[in-house]
Image (spheres, grey):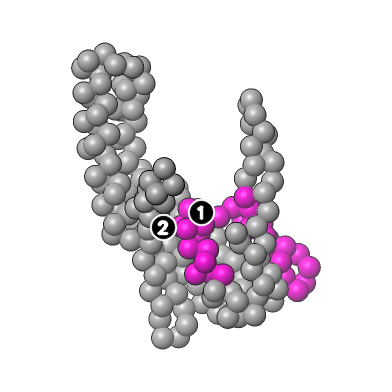
């Protein structure tokens, strides 16, 4: 079961890393990630349509059938804009939906440490937690960031780059 989980994560969270001569780095979604989502779409459609015709969990499979159209209209276009640019001065992140992207820049000047902390988030029925990254600066004012999937998937690469710059990074 652990093997299936790691294979799933490698397929749907794969990335491509390009390092430039000046030391800057660009992280984008890998072609295998696009392919995995593009293959998942017709498979989900076929399985849910087959179940719908045989009246197997009709409500769930109908919702799954129509919900699968999120993949080509939201997921795939969103992956095309998703990227992380990192140089010696800043880390620029662009993620989210293609029609409403989330863009932010984190300054690396004066950065002393990066720490991941779980914080409770109130849900309707049960207590959940969300992991935030805190960028701590020499000035004393931290910056809180909710990391995207691409950031989380490439945290080992980011930790290596931050350590090269003398920044302590604790991102499990």
**Circles 2, 1 touching at the beta carbon (< 8 Å):** yes
Q: Residue at x 52, y 66 (%)?
A: 156
Magenta region, residue range: 131-159
User: In the picture, which quadrant includes the N terminus?
Assistant: top left
Q: Name the residue that disc number 2 marks.
A: 82
Residue 68 in the image: x percent, y percent?
31, 34
Helix, strand or loop under label 2 = loop
Q: Nearer the viewer, residue 132 or 2?
A: 2
Q: Is residue 119 magenta?
A: no
The outermost residue toward the right is 140
Q: Residue at x 72, y 70 (%)?
A: 137
Left or right: 65, with 148 as reference point: left
* Residue 9 seen anywhere in this rendered image of the structure: no
Residue 131 in the image: x percent, y percent?
62, 50
Q: Residue at x 60, y 59 (%)?
A: 172
Q: Nearer the viewer, mark 2 or mark 1?
A: 1
Quarter where residue 56 is shown: top left
Q: Is residue 141 magenta?
A: yes
Q: Nearer the viewer, residue 81 or 63?
A: 63
Residue 171 in the image: x percent, y percent?
61, 61
The answer to whether residue 61 is above or below residue 110 is: above
Quarter where residue 64 is shown: top left
The answer to whether residue 95 is above or below residue 113 is: above
Q: Name the residue that disc number 1 marks.
A: 148
């Amino acid at each position: 079961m652990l093997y299936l989980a790691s294979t799933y994560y490698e397929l749907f969270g794969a990335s491509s890393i390009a390092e430039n001569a000046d030391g800057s780095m660009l992280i984008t979604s890998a072609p295998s990630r696009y392919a995995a989502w593009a293959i998942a779409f017709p498979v989900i459609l076929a399985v849910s349509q087959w179940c719908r015709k045989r009246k197997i969990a009709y409500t769930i499979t109908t919702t799954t059938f129509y919900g699968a159209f999120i993949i080509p209209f939201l997921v795939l276009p969103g992956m095309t804009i998703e990227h992380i640019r990192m140089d010696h001065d800043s880390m620029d992140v662009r993620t989210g939906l293609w029609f409403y992207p989330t863009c932010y820049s984190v300054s690396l000047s004066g950065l002393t440490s990066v720490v991941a902390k779980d914080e409770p988030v109130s849900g309707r029925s049960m207590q959940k937690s969300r992991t935030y990254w805190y960028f701590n600066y020499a000035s004393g004012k931290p910056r809180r960031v909710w990391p995207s999937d691409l950031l989380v998937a490439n945290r080992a690469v980011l930790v290596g780059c931050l350590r090269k710059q003398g920044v302590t990074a604790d991102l499990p």
